[in-house]
Amino acid sequence: MLDRYTWGNAERISQEAPVLVLQANRTEARLGGGANVCAMLRGLDASVSCVGVVGQDETGETLRQMLEDDGVDHRLVLVDPSRPTTVKERFMGCAAGRHPNQILRLDNESRLLLDQHLEEELIRSLQASVGFHDAVLISDHGKGVCTPRLLRATIDACRSAQVPVLIDPRHMNDYAVYRGATVLKPNRVEAQTATGFRIEKGEDAFRAGERLCEQLELETAVITLDRDGMALIPRGGAAQLHATRPRAVYDITGAGDVVLAVLGVCWAAGIAPADAVQFGNIAGALEVERTGVSKVTRSEIRSELLVQTQSEFDSILTLGELETFGHCQRQWGRKIVFTNGCFDLLHVGHVTYLAEAASYGDVLVVGVNSDASVRQLKGPSRPVIGEFDRAALLTALACVDGVVIFEESTPHRLLRALRPDVLVKGGTYASHEVVGREVVEAYGGEVRVTGIVEGISTTRIVESVRRLGASQQVLSLPEHRPQYDQKCPAREAG
């Protein structure tokens, strides 16, 4: 399909009839339908072959040229002289400087079933080319091209070649034509129509997805639930609901296409279905925030994932969260640095060493000895400051991205969970003396030793305070401890 847009101001009512007058100021053409899925795939850096039909008209030529300009192989886009190229023309009006809204859509299309000669040609071409691709995506808009024979031949060819086939179905009562697909991705209304189940919550979607998987021999059903996110229902496995955060929805056009594109890339690359659905959820949410169809890129998905995941973690991590935190950072291509210590009475030596440690990568995680382990290392009079207060002080530093408290005498469990790229220790150690070196180097990580600030140590500070106490000096402490769960100005500035 080709999507055409006419943009303008709609600030007055016609004197001829009670209708808006659109004062047009620009027009635009974008790829739509299956062609838009191809464009979305290109935005995700995939190599794409487009299969479909256009009319023998100027619009068809425009569409093929746009595919070529986008780097899409369109040799299997056939011409049917008996039908027009499908065009959806949208008129977009804004008033008083507000966000533009769609005020009218004009469709020019044919829904007649594809000519048998063209159907045979497409079947032969698909059967010959499926094995050279990592996934096949079917965007069925019910325009007559996705005939039952063509769908059956494509699904069977994919199964024979062990190539995943993912389908965005049209709205109809019987989905038997999609039997044997790898993934079927209906929306809420389509799933309700196909199964007869009303879908109001996640459990309803699970039930509908299980019915679809069972009846159609699907590997997986993914049901998009607009504001409620997406439901992942693997055949014979545990269903999951992936929520989406609230969005300002400007235009739903293209949201289903970008979700199909993201799922296709993920299935082609062997990414876990749960991660694939999470990425698709994010991409669809980004799309509805925009007016009209536009590409969503990997970097945009990565940035949104970063924002979402960081908001899920407190700066003070548990051991259970540490592994997930590390996995997410690696997905974003970030280099993880880890260091550990007591950090009792945080001083300039600590801050200098932590800043140097942070410079070796993109993310710095600090392991802090618990009160019990500090007493084992330093004696019964230490620590001076409790473990949670020490951790809170560290999270206030702009160079620190996460802190985890540990009870053991060594950080080995933390290192195995986080798998940092760099292990850093401050002091006069040689690299081979750093505790945990053997864990990190075993999987290819590196060990660094930072310098020290001469004459500064917690032990010396404690001794100085004791001497002050012996000479009758008084150390004034605040009556109330500060609330460390509030935002720290130093961290915000950083």
Image (cartoon, grey):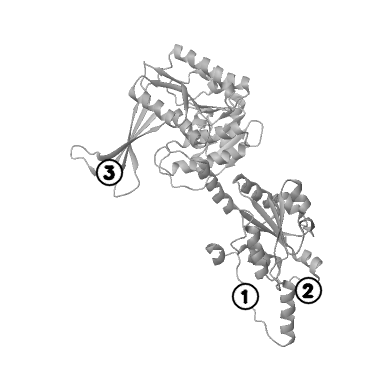
Q: Is residue 166 visible?
A: yes
Q: Can you say which quadrant of the picture contains the N terminus?
A: top left
Specify the farthest residue to the bottom.
472
Residue bearing the label numbered 2: 381
Q: Earlier in the sequence, mark 1 or mark 3?
A: 3
Neighbours of disc 3 within 10 Å: few (<14), some (14-19), many (20+): some
Q: State the image coordinates of residue 410 (x, y, percent, origin top left).
A: 78, 58
Of callouts 2 and 3, the N-terminal one: 3
Q: Which residue is mark 3?
A: 9
Asked which secondary structure carries label 1, the reply is loop
Q: Amino acid at mark 3?
A: Asn
Residue at 61% x, 39% y is 274
In the displayed structure, 444 sits above or below 151; it is below
The residue positioned 54% from the left and 66% from the top of the image is 489
Q: Is residue 171 visible?
A: no
Q: Are marks 2 and 3 in contact (CB under 8 Å)?
A: no
Amino acid at dot 2: Ser
What is the C-alpha distance between the residues marked 2 and 3? 75 Å
- Name the kind of residue labelled 1 in the image: His
Residue 43 appears at what percent x and percent y?
49, 37
Residue at the spot of label 1: 480
Q: Residues within 10 Å of mark 2 (few under 14, many from 20)?
A: few
Q: Secondary structure at mark 2?
A: loop
254 or 111, nearer to the observer: 254
